[in-house]
Amino acid sequence: MDKKVTLASDWLAGCAGCHMSLLDIDERILALLEKVQLLSTPITDLKRPPETGVDVGVLEGAVNNSATEEVAKLMRSRCKCLVALGDCAVFGGVPAMREGANPQAALQRAYCETESTVAGQIPADAELATLRPTQALSEVVEVDVNVPGCPPSADVIFYVLSELVAGRKPVLKGPLLDWH
């Protein structure tokens, strides 16, 4: 049997809808798993791609704080081909909507003023992520394949992964972009 293509995925600032769409490829996932070894994904609950690296890295979500920036840079450093999956990763998506708001006011509302908060305070700890302007993945690291959609359809995701497994760069145009 041929060596399996290794794949790792993770999510940044987003809703996890792209990973749900990945799971929506249904029984076709079995055909992929004959050729792909999942090494770290939110699906397997393994948190980091192996130090030895992977063939394909898939990230969904935007980069909007120090933690998501770190995840993006780690994935890029450990994969041969990086896929930006979904509108948040490709364009900044819904997380970018916060850019018109005052970050300090948002933190105040979230930690101190919610209806269920009692004696809340905004956490101040070096271990916590610091806010950054929201960016598309390609503004932070080099991206090899952009797959737009909110989320991309299961058919598009299956096509992209199948092409990568076959050693080809997927071409997304025409009917493949008409999934809405």
Image (spheres, rainbow, N blue to C red):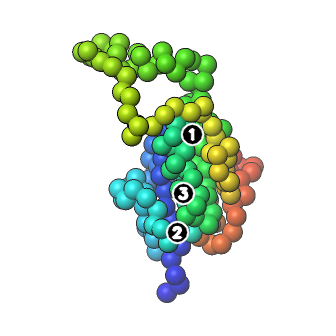
Identify the secondary structure beneath mark 2: loop
The numbered mark, 1 or 3, whose residue comes first in the sequence reads: 1
* Residue farthest to the right, as pictured: 174
Where is residue 163? Give x, y as percent.
Answer: 64, 66
Where is residue 53? Give x, y as percent.
Answer: 52, 69
Where is residue 110? Give x, y as percent.
Answer: 39, 20
> At 57% across and 40% down in the image, what residue appears?
63
Identify the secondary structure beneath mark 3: helix
Q: Name the residue under label 3.
A: 75
Q: Is 51 above or below relative to 171?
A: below
Q: Name the residue under label 1.
A: 62
Identify the secondary structure beneath mark 1: loop
Q: Answer whether labels 2 and 1 touch (C-beta < 8 Å).
A: no
* Residue farthest to the bottom, as pictured: 1
Q: Which amino acid does label 1 sit on?
A: Ala
Q: Is residue 88 left or right of residue 37?
A: right
> At 38% across and 28% down in the image, what residue appears?
124
Q: Which of 157 and 106 is in front in this view?
A: 106
Decide if residue 4 is in sight here: yes
Q: Which amino acid does label 3 sit on?
A: Met
Q: Which of 87 and 136 is in front in this view?
A: 136
Q: Mark 2 points at which residue?
A: 53
